[in-house]
Amino acid sequence: MNDVLDVTLRLLIVFVVFLTFPLIIGQTEHKVMAHMQGRLGPMYAGGFHGWAQLIADGVKFAQKEDVVPAGADRRIFQLAPAVALLPYLLVLLAIPIGPDEGAVGQVIDAGVFFVLAVMGVGVLGSLMAGWASANKFSLLGGLRTAAQLLAYELPMLLTAASVAMAAGTVSIPGILDAFEWWWLPWQIVGAIVFFVAGLAELQRPPFDMPVADSEIIFGAYTEYTGLRFALFLLAEYAGIVVLCGLTTVLFLGGWHGPWGADGLGWVWTLLKTAVLAFLVIWLRVTYPRLREDQLQKLSWTLLVPLSLAQIALTGIVKVVIQ
Amino acid sequence: MTLAATVGILATGPIPITTAAADTHGFLSPTGVEIAFLLVGLVTFGAAIVTVTTRQLVHAALWLVVTLGGLAVEYLLLTAEFIAWVQVLIYVGSVVVLLLFGLMLTRAPIGRSPDADSGNRWAALTVAVASAAALVWVVVDAFRTTWIDLDGPAAGSTEATGASLFQNWVLPFEALSVLLLAALVGAIVLSRKAKAGAATTAESTSAARSEKDPRTEKGSRSEKEGTR
């Protein structure tokens, strides 16, 4: 029974992280955006600097009526938020936060493949939502989502493959065990490409044309209300957690840091993830939205060649140092 | 503990690890993993049948997701983790998305498509049954007495797969790479020709494109008329 208890405990911890971290990032986004724009942001809910704003939002969403449009494909419309959200929960299982056996939900042999594969599945949720809503704007949003995924999955995969080549393993804890500080300059191009491609896969600004509110209302999520809409929003913020965590463990050395090696590794992981999440918010405030064709051009003419160059560089250095 | 074992535990409770059962391999006392394998197989089979029989085009694509995902779970239960995740990455994550993209771009009505049926259904059924029978026969005949030791080191781990692929199967692997490269170059050549030579060779390219994808016929025809 010990095994079952162990598995249950790990699943429970991952689930709690999954429910709380996206909310923390969402609240940080409210405040950081506000201060960058010379505002105060939420100040009332909960008393202290509006800390409970997202909880209040959640209560509001839960009270709203769950409307399914008359012309919609009912079952798929209702299933879509779950398909969008659950993959990120699964990915969180595989991200290690510390060097010990106990600091990861589940050690997966082909971890890099697992996380990229499952993250790709999440996009199916947006596609289902876009199609099943029976709404032109939703369909356009779904189409843009699909085009974006097809363009950005390749650079993500290639740069992840570059790290796997450097480490000689596709297991995420294995990659972290092999990490050395000089990987940082070695893999920096790959890291940037991975992060940018990940932002595009999550449809975060400046790559948010699938939900571009000034063009297509809210893309695939236009027809959603109440709790299901909240689930899509939660999926977006869970995606930020996952992307920042993945960039941390693949490219920034996860629990490795200049000091605090024993026992404090998890602080480094969380710190790096938090800094990256701040960067995600910062980018949203700073850059205007790209146009759809600019996005495709960026991927195919810049990110893919850069990631191929990174793979070549990784291969050359790897052969030279052996 | 591998993920396969975890899935086994989550699905059926703790695996009875008894050496006696592992030695005899009887069909009458199946282990938890075997039962899970069978059940997932049934689900996959059912989803595959719905995929080809449903009259709703997008539903067919979504049932295909269930089918391919079920296959990935079967690979997992056979301890072939690497193949399982590649299956999810390539088929569920990319091929089906491409399929849905194509469907949404052309026509994807909500509800039944009356023309989503083929007069060839009996021929298709015959071919499907024949190829399934051939495949099952070959696999059963080839692996009749091979058993995967689920308690030992994973037989389909990334390391094992990589070693076998690049030691014993390098030539087929490279041949496949060349084939895929040729397909890639071919696709690029086709798409570039259609754009650059639209004025002079519109007739031939629109024919070539309509062969590949009927929906572009209309677009290239109007394009041709525009150039006139």
Image (tube, coloured by chain):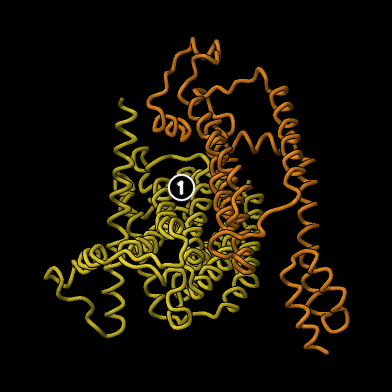
Chain colours: A yellow, B orange
The amino acid beneath tag 1 is Leu
- Which quarter of the image is occupied by the C terminus of chain A? top right
- Image: A142 above or below B59: below
- Image: A85 above or below A49: above
User: Which SS class for mark 1?
Assistant: helix
**Residue wearing tag 1:** A176
Q: Determine whether, in the image, residue B84 is placed left or right of residue A309.
A: left
Q: Residue at x 54, y 60 (%)?
A: B111
Q: Determine whether, in the image, residue A300 is placed left or right of residue B73.
A: right
| Camera-nearest residue between A297 and B120 | B120
Q: Residue at x 57, y 65 (%)?
A: B109
- Image: B174 above or below A242: above
Count of number-bearing discs = 1
Q: Quadrant of residue A241?
A: bottom left
Q: Residue at x 13, y 68 (%)?
A: A46
Q: Position of residue B89 (x, y in %)?
A: 57, 50
- Which quarter of the image is occupied by the N terminus of chain A? top left
Q: Position of residue B16 (x, y in %)?
A: 42, 18
| Camera-nearest residue between A248 and A112 | A112
Q: Position of residue A317 (x, y in %)?
A: 63, 54
Q: Residue at x 55, y 22 (%)?
A: B149
